[in-house]
Amino acid sequence: MRFSIATAVAFALVGGGTADPVPGVSPAEVVRAVDAGKSFDIDKLVQTSPILPKPEIVLLIDVTGSMAGTIENIKTNLKSVIETVTTDQPAAKFAVVSFGDLADPNGFTVHQDLTSNVGALQTAVDNLKAEAGGDTAEDWIYALHKVATGSVSFSDDSTSSRIVVLVGDATSHDPSGGISLGQAIDDVTKAKIRVIGVDVGGLDSDGKAHEVTSATGGIIIGSDAKDVSAAIVSGLKALDVTIKPSIVSCDDGLSLHFSPSDKTVNSGSSATFLENVKVASSATKGASLTCTVEFLVDGVPGGPTFVQKVIVQVNNPDSCFTCDPHPGKNKCHITTSCTPTPYGTMCLTRPGLKADGADDDDTSVQWRLNWNVPGHEHRIAVKPGTSSNTLCSFEHVGNDICKEVSVAKCKPVALNDLGQHGNGQNENGNQNMNEDQKVMGNGDL
């Protein structure tokens, strides 16, 4: 990919009036109540950062005689470049490396290894001098080889994004210092380095630079001396990134599947996934199960905002709570009434209303009664203490009103007087039943 100088400057200047979207995954946490053996889907959006996470950026600069104007621009604007990058990625590090003709004293030099020390980086750049360079071609093929094989101290490739910004105005000798173009490409790809070419003249005059950037997932930015710093920033913001969900942990009985398994987008844009969450038929009823997923950006952790949790409360169909209508023992919310049913006295909602803030299929909170008596087909019972002011869906009318709420098949149980045991058991683990909570019929819930 090649950008023109105009495009480069536009990339560097864009966003002055509008805040960038916050990078990370959305929704970051999902909590659902689901029956064992069931599944559900979640639409996931992952917003990427304009610059790759934890970048380690090597400024690889041609210092032959024709590069004087370019070098002066970098000296003047280096702090601005660093500030732009670290605003987006505070953990960013930079290195300053120069190259020229190997026949000259300035053939290859590491002026500053990777650091976040702005003063040290500025000093390294200030010491660059444009001189020598007897012929047209330089030796950046050799320089890439050296950077990729140990001359720069990159961090572990699984925790950082390795980037080389190759700034020059001429092609390279090939071979260069005994290193062929093919060997250099192998070196940088094995080292998982992305190469950005900033062409201020003839860097890609014979296509070699394009071969390198294409093989490494990089880009070539066309520029001139006065805009080279803007071009560097533009290149850093124009890389494609691959987003891949990685399951960190998942409780037994819960599994996740993502479609697609990964997605490549431009840095700064978003990727969408369909996440399928499945609860095993063998999952323990009443259990709380959790999966944690990290969305990797080019294989590198994007940070805390790229981590999501899926929490599933496995419905317990044996927890249809009854209520005690006696004074002082009635725990039903004021929006419901403790009413006799064929299955015990339960907290019934008013006709056409259901529980507030509960999923329609969460039978641990609300459930529809299988009550085949005219006028009662739609009745909904809720766990004692549950407020119920939410209108049922308008999609269902008549005897089908509130049909979106699941019918639960369960035995009536009751909360203890304190209303604190969600499994309908007392402190000794026994079900709370009394004469006023007997089953009043043979129907199923």
Image (spheres, rainbow, N blue to C red):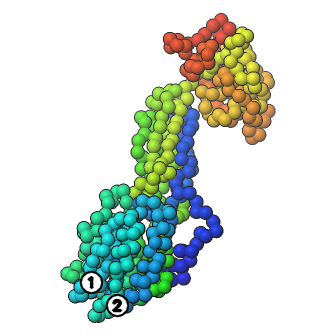
Q: Is residue 68 visible?
A: yes
Seen at 42% across and 79% down, the residue is: 75
Residue 222 in picture, x, y percent from top left: 46, 83
First-in-chain label (1 vs 2): 2
**Quadrant location of the N terminus?**
bottom left
Q: Does residue 206 appear in this view?
A: no
**Amino acid identity at mark 2:** Gly
**Type of residue at label 1?**
Asn
Which residue is the extreme one toward the left? 178
Q: Secondary structure at mark 1?
A: loop
Residue sitting nearer the eye, 247 or 283: 247
> Can you give x and y, in whole percent of width and height, for residue 197 in the image?
40, 78
Task: Determine the residue positioned at 70% across, 15% down.
Answer: 330
In the rendered image, the vertical position of residue 315 relative to residue 201, given as above or below: above
Q: Residue 323: horizontal and vertical position, in percent?
A: 67, 16
Q: Name the residue tied to disc 1.
A: 106
| Residue 66 occupies quadrant | bottom left
Asked whether, in this view, residue 242 is left or right of residue 150, the answer is right
Q: Is residue 69 above or below residue 12?
A: below
Q: Residue at x 78, y 28 (%)?
A: 351
Q: Secondary structure at mark 2?
A: helix
Q: Residue at x 44, y 49 (%)?
A: 294
In the rendered image, the vertical position of residue 91 relative to residue 316, given as above or below: below
Quadrant assignment for the C terminus = top right
Q: Which mark is residue 65?
A: 2
* Callout count: 2
Q: CA distance from mark 1 to mark 2?
A: 11 Å
Other residues around mark 2 within 10 Å, as few (<14) / some (14–19) / many (≥20)? some
Examine the image and state in which quarter residue 183 appears.
Answer: bottom left
Query: Quick one: label 1, few (<14), some, or many (20+) residues within 10 Å?
Result: many
Task: Identify the residue at the far top of this view.
Answer: 435
